[in-house]
Image (cartoon, grey):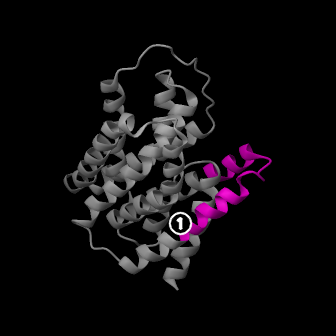
Amino acid sequence: MDYLLYFSLTFVFSTLFGVIGLGSSLVLIPALSLLGVEFNFAKAVGLFVNGITTLSITIKNLKSGVLSFVEILPYLIVSIVFAYLGAHTTVFISKNVVQILLLLFIFLSVVMMFTHLHYQTSKQQHSRFLIGSIISFIAFIGGLLGVGGGAVSLPLFMLLGIDTKKSISLTSVLIPFVSFSGFASYVTFVQMDWVLLGIVGIAAMLGGITAHAITKKISNEKLLKFFIASVLVGVSIAMSIKEL
């Protein structure tokens, strides 16, 4: 019965969040924690689900030609390394501190959900070191908290004046690498329920397919975002009451 519940939650959240382009780990982690799943394992599940749901988008964007593999390779390497380190760092930080950081990250993501950025695309060449530093930080936080970090990385890239289409492509390409690298790190020190992971993985794939199918049929995305934000806030408050 628990597995059916986890499957249902993952499918619903992956579908809802997939429609607006966010990873469902933002709500899966606090939801699973509320259901009694060990916190670090819940983060591992969140990263695994994020990786599954964004993988097809990553492949599509790499094939689109917006970003060349040579251009993206250094960023992929630093994202993999820092996501792995971020996940391992959680061992040395109090669980309550990580939970508070997660709640703050969720709040930031909710704010970003309703923030429309209108920055002029800059003509200047951006420092690869600066972009790499931002990616390293986001990957580290992603591994630590169990999230993909797309809700924060996209606005940051746009703040740098990077072309919107390129910013979206860069973000979507990085998320699965951050997710799977962080997940691989958790595997080394967290007891895994591989049956549960298989079940949520299937649910995430089905949710991603469903989200893609209904995206073009959504007529009121703002209302959907409000509903999702309400779910995020509600689950986060419930987790904070239970755990903190």
Dividing the picture into quadrants, the one containing residue 16 is bottom right
Q: Amino acid at mark 1?
A: Ala
Q: Residue at x 66, y 57 (%)?
A: 212
Q: Could you tell me which secondary element the residue under label 1 belongs to?
A: helix
Residue furthest toward the left?
A: 92
User: Which residue position holds label 1?
Assistant: 204
Q: Residue at x 52, y 38 (%)?
A: 65
Res 108 seen here: no
Q: Is residue 214 left or right of residue 135?
A: right
Q: Which residues are magenta?
A: 203-230
Q: Identify whether 18 is placed above or below 206.
A: above
Q: Is residue 118 left or right of residue 220?
A: left
Q: Is residue 221 left or right of residue 117?
A: right
Name the spot of residue 218 as percent of width and height, x first: 76, 51
Q: Nearer the viewer, residue 225 or 47?
A: 47
Residue furthest toward the bottom?
A: 1
Magenta portion: prevailing SS class: helix
Q: Residue at x 21, y 57 (%)?
A: 91
Dividing the picture into quadrants, the one containing residue 38 is bottom left
Question: Is 53 a magenta residue?
Answer: no
Q: Is residue 59 left or right of residue 185?
A: right
Name the spot of residue 189 as percent of width and height, x first: 22, 66
Q: Identify whether 187 is placed above or below 237.
A: below
Question: Is 208 a magenta residue?
Answer: yes
Name the spot of residue 156 as percent of width and height, x first: 46, 29
